[in-house]
């Protein structure tokens, strides 16, 4: 699917996710974790590839979120696993329209190193 016909899903208002926080939403068939990093928005696969914890419940430090169960960390900007940057989970296009956050159900393309189930 090209970017021009990406379908976005309304998930929340911008005030629902304060800076430094995150929430998980069902977008299409996937759970997606949406992060507010200093007013910039990022969306990654919510399901940790280790044992399935919600990454939206993790601790955000800068651009890295640490899984609440066993502390695997991921870069919310590109989905890379911090222990091995060549391996990545899915990231999703996210945008703000007015005061609403919208996320695409179609992940961003990922050339290699797929960690997503
Ligand atoms: S479930 Fe995320 S690190 Fe284990």
Image (tube, rainbow, N blue to C red):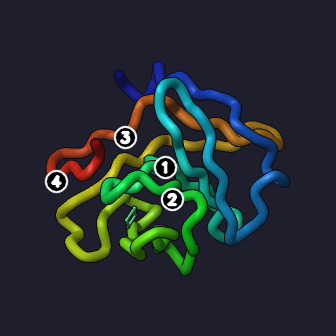
Circles 3 and 2 in contact, beta carbons < 8 Å: no
**According to the image, label 4 marks what residue?**
113
Q: Residue furthest bottom?
A: 61
Q: Residues within 10 Å of mark 3 (few under 14, many from 20)?
A: some
Give the position of the C terminus as an image quadrant: top left
Viewer-closest of 114 and 69: 69
Calculate the distance from the C-alpha at mark 1 to the C-alpha at mark 4.
18 Å
Query: Is 43 left, or right, of 80 in this rendering?
Result: right
* Residue 70 rendering spot, x and y as whole percentages: 40, 73
Depth check: give the residue in front, 11 or 68: 68
Compared with residue 2, is residue 88 higher up or lower down, i.e. above or below? below
What x and y, as percent, mark residue 63? 49, 73
Gap in Å between the C-alphas at discs 2 and 1? Answer: 5 Å
> SS class of the residue under badge 4?
loop
Question: How many other residues sit within 10 Å of disc 2, few (<14), some (14-19) or many (≥20)?
Answer: many
First along the sequence among labels 3 and 2:
2
Which is more foreground, mark 2 or mark 4?
2
Q: Is mark 2 within 8 Å of ligand 1?
A: yes
Q: Earlier in the sequence, mark 2 or mark 1?
A: 1
Q: Earlier in the sequence, mark 2 or mark 4?
A: 2
- Residue 72 image position (x, y, % from top left): 37, 72
* Cβ at disc 3 under 8 Å from ligand 1: no
Whole-angstrom CA distance, mark 2 to mark 4, is 19 Å
Q: Which residue is mark 1?
A: 46
Number of other residues with Cα within 10 Å of mark 1, as a class: few under 14, some 14 to 19, many 20 or more: many
Residue, disc 3? 108
| Residue with the mark numbered 2 | 55
């Amino acid at each position: 699917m090209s970017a021009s016909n990406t379908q976005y899903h309304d998930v929340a208002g911008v005030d629902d996710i304060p800076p430094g926080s995150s929430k998980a939403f069902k977008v299409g068939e996937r759970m997606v974790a949406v992060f507010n990093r200093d007013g910039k928005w990022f969306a990654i696969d919510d399901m940790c590839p280790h044992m399935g914890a919600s990454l939206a419940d993790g601790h955000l430090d800068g651009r890295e979120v640490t899984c609440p169960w066993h502390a695997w960390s991921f870069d919310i900007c590109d989905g890379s696993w911090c222990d091995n940057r060549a391996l990545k989970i899915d990231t999703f296009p996210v945008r703000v329209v007015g005061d609403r956050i919208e996320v695409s159900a179609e992940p961003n393309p990922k050339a290699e190193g797929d960690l997503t189930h």
